[in-house]
Amino acid sequence: MRIILFSLGSRGDIQPILALASRLNREGHTAVVSSSPDFAELAASHGIEYAPIGPSLTTIGDAEEISKIVESGNILKLILYGRKIRNMQSNIVQQCIQESWQVAQGADAILYKPSAAIIGYNIAEKLGIPCAELALFPVYRTRVFPSFMLGGGKNRGPLLNDLFWRLSELLFWQLMQRGTANRQRREILDLPPLPLSGPYQQQEREGMPVFNAYSPSVLPRPADWPARMHVTGYYFSAPPTDWQPPAELVEFLRSGPPPVCIGFGSMPIHNVEEKIRMVVKALMLSGQRGILISGWTTIKKSISLPDDVIRVESIPHSWLFPRMAAVVHHGGAGTTAASLRSGVPTIITPFAADQPAWGQRVYTLGVGPKPIPFKKLTAEGLAAAIREAVTNPEIQKRARELGQRIQAEDGPGRTIELFFQYIEQFRRLK
């Protein structure tokens, strides 16, 4: 089968999709990953066919304004800013919906992330082919835990949990998706508009699967979810076969005890130099060596670092994290997955969206200290968290045991098994 996988977002969004695509290819299918042009080279390094849609992410929005909003942790501001950008740059929306329709020609099935829901679901309906959603964190309502997008770190009890989930569905559909989805249906696909309440009831009637690509050992499946909701396990990929670690990094690792890795993924950071000085001070106060990973926020070479701290560009987490004493990061779903799988303690400094929820989950599982919101991060606070992570034997034991359980799971294999069961059911009903 020819299967298109749509994803919009950062590297943390695309990396797990590439892992699933690789597995589909190994099982004899043709997987085509479609996202912004930023990750074409990454896909090629894994031997995966790639179909870019839309412009580079670096050309969208004002970096300074985005960094301030992201650092504030206010998800509503982030949603409204995204809506403003979409309205100001309607040509980008038009480009994405036109190009995605062209990419999908000849597809036998579609898998899509929630960020690309307005693309994937509509196109599958028009083509009359099966589709399913791939979620890196929970996107379906439950009374068991709070909405991951609206203050997911705080459990408010069954009734309020349910209310906030419904509110998050409404917000994202009305503010972020509805206008674009129905524009695509009207102008490109010649389909009737989706209802005011969104596509959720229609998907429920169809039994369309949602594959939650995280470990049930990290977040068990809620009992109140319908049968079409699955928790499959994480999607991981090995480094490209020709990849080699930088010689400077290998030498640094050999020259002393395991360091602490610190990186904030693709989070745009305001006053970068000031934040780097704070992080370096935290390492000095905790008595640890450190590795700073550049994301989209480049760590300039002009910034002076002490001898026991080095900067590196993007390094495969599966290679780097198991060699660390602890990992400090923003709590993105993909980075959290990699750090938990490594079996070393995790320290999360969340910005917004699902990150506070993953930070709280890490703390609840006892595999890392209490999360520190990035906007409240200080050298002293981070140093205390690092000291706790690297000296607490109970945290280290739990992190090691959880890592072993995650390593034994096969998220891509389980997803493919369930998806093809649905495809057979879809064909019988058709």
Image (cartoon, grey):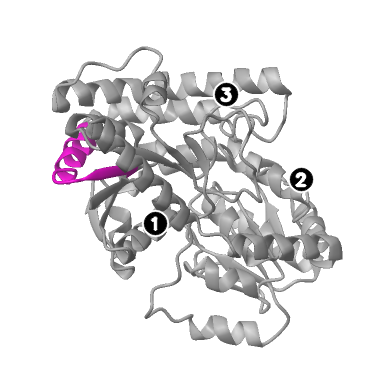
Mark 2 or mark 3, earlier in chain: 3
Identity, as a three-letter code, of the amino acid under mark 1: Leu
Q: Residue at x 15, y 23 (%)?
A: 187
Q: Residues within 10 Å of mark 1 (few under 14, many from 20)?
A: many
In this picture, residue 280 sits left or right of residue 113: right
Compared to residue 43, the image places residue 118 above or below, namely above
Mark 3 — residue? 165
Count the labels in the image: 3
Dot 3 falls on a residue whose secondary structure is helix
Indicate the secondary structure of the residue bearing disc 2: helix
**Which of pointers 1 and 3 lies earlier in the amino acid sequence?**
1
| Residue under numbered circle 2 | 364
The residues colored magenta run 94-111
> Horizontal placement of 281 versus 205: left or right?
right
Q: Can residue 178 be seen in this view?
A: yes
* Eye-nearest disc, 2 or 1: 1
Q: Mark 2 and mark 1 in contact? Answer it, CB < 8 Å.
A: no
Q: In this view, does 209 lie above or below 370?
A: above
Q: Is residue 98 magenta?
A: yes
In the image, what residue occupies the spot 48% across and 80% down?
Answer: 245
Q: Position of residue 221 (x, y in %)?
A: 61, 39
